[in-house]
Image (cartoon, rainbow, N blue to C red):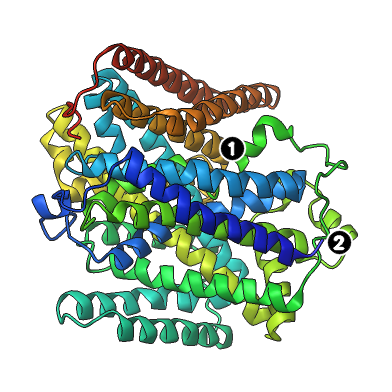
Amino acid sequence: MSAIVLAALGLGGFALGYVFYSRFIADRIFQLDPDFETPAHAQEDGVDFVPTNRWVLWGHHFTSIAGAAPIVGPAIGVIWGWLPAFLWVTVGTVFFAGVHDAGALWASVRNRGESIGALTESVVGKRARSLFMVVIFLLLLMVNAVFAIIIAQLFVDVRSSVIPAWFVIAVALGIGWLLYRRGVPLLWPSLIALGLLYASMFVGAVFPVSLPEEVLGLQEPAQWVLILFVYAAIASLLPVWVLLQPRDYINGIQLFVGLAIFFMAVLLANPTVVAPAFNTGLPDDVPPLLPLLFVTIACGAISGFHGLVSSGTTSKQLDKESDVRFVGYLGSVGEGALALAAIIACTAGFATLGEWDSFYSTFAAGGIPAFVQGGGAIISEGLRLPVHFAETLLAVMAVLFAATTMDTGVRLQRYIVQEWGVIYDLPILTGRVAATIIAVGLCIALAFGAGGGAGTGGLMIWPLFGTTNQLLAGLTLLILSVILMKLGRPTIYTLVPMVFVLVMTVLALLVQLAGFWRQEQYFLLVMDLFILAAAIWVALEALSTLRRARMSEPEEEVEVGV
């Protein structure tokens, strides 16, 4: 089958979903009010609460959620065949992710910019909030540790990506100064920034960068991990307008240009999807499609991490409540397009089925290497670019989005530590610097401690990332359903995705439990049990609240601030 057909069906479905379904959800379910005073105005502080142009904020939100996961998940998930991955990404984006992301943003905006974890106390209760926030913190710990390791390995494997990945920070600082201190309109800074970014890719190809093989006993990947966390700590303390917003905005533009380049190359090269629709010759280590597909491909279909970004940083910068649809729902559509590109790259970027089978010889064989190799081949053939430059382009895309997710993830971890300081009356935790040191310190401990000092320990808990992520998405949809029911609004549009996601995720956790037991991976086994127990507890409490809300009369103004 031609990859053009796959691209047209996927992109067409996303466009229809945004034009029609998102408008219905925004107008009839969330009932967005452009005159509502958002937290960015009501609590403006110039650091975290900053009213932001919706295009700039969309760039921050999109690049924060579109990290490495919407590439890694689909690039692994196609091992079951391209059709299950394609259907889950398209249907999940339109009917699951868009509602989840926009809903979490709307609920937070209506509640003083509180995170979805803090909001749980108002909706469900204190016990549920405490458990919910522990699950959230564990997820952020996994995200930050694993993404740091992924970036570090990309710096080692594709050394031409190092200069453009760090150069974008200087460009972002300049853009932030021009926009917020000089009041320069967006157009010219955007074009100049994009031109400088692509020029830096040519420079990176000419001057590849590497660190010493060993420093104080640390190998090169471990050195990069430490450097990345030092940067993330500093970035999380800066006002959002200085670095976070402009960096994410530039990356957002770069991603859309990169996606346009990729899909243009697909149109010109017209590659054939060589992977099977359903793979009947699976390697021995591949788990069952049901339920593991729905946690392997999380970001790009639906992701609990998106709710953390929506309610953690994005809600504090929303200028008008009516921007929820554009920023939240369209952000998920953009990530769906990235996941679609990953599916096409990893199924049509190989010359023959035999070559594809040889690459996907084990369950862990996919991921970013498959995306870079397959996508690079398509871009090189379609646009007549050197293969090395095409692969650098895709590697830089992956690095930049993983890095911006880390920026946001560390900032969100800092918020949670500070919230704990308020909840438990521990003033030392409420300070921004102390909270950041604690958050980053735990991430480094995971990356190095579990890996025997090699800086790869975060990969140990990667099998739990997808399940924890999807549990959080299901619980967020459950909280949204309670809010909507208290308002007397339809809940089917959040309850149906919630039931599906929670059922598949609990089944996946049980399958993983059995696997961890057989493999004697007791660290993962204990974490799996804890996450499962906490999620079930929160779900039961929320379901009880949902039942009470159903039996009570709808309220025009409810406790949650809507």
* Label whose residue precedes the other's in the sequence (2 or 1): 1
* Camera-nearest label, 2 or 1: 1
- Place of residue 408 in the rendered image (x, y in percent of width and height, measured from the top left): 34, 54
Q: Residue furthest right?
A: 354
**In the displayed structure image, the side of residue 84 where residue 114 appears, left or right:** left
The residue tagged 2 is 355
Q: Is residue 424 left or right of residue 29?
A: left
Relative to 383, is 68 on the left or the right?
A: left
Front residue of 273 and 244: 273
Can you tell which quarter of the image residue 6 is in?
A: bottom right
Tell me which amino acid carries mark 2.
Glu
Tell me the kind of residue under disc 1.
Val
Spatial separation of the CA atoms under disc 2 and disc 1: 27 Å
Count the labels in the image: 2
The circle on residue 65 is: none
Residue displayed at 41% across by 74% down: 166
Up the image or down, 344 lies above or below 169; here it is above
The reply to whether discs 2 and 1 touch (Cβ–Cβ < 8 Å) is no
Residue 71 location, quadrant: bottom right
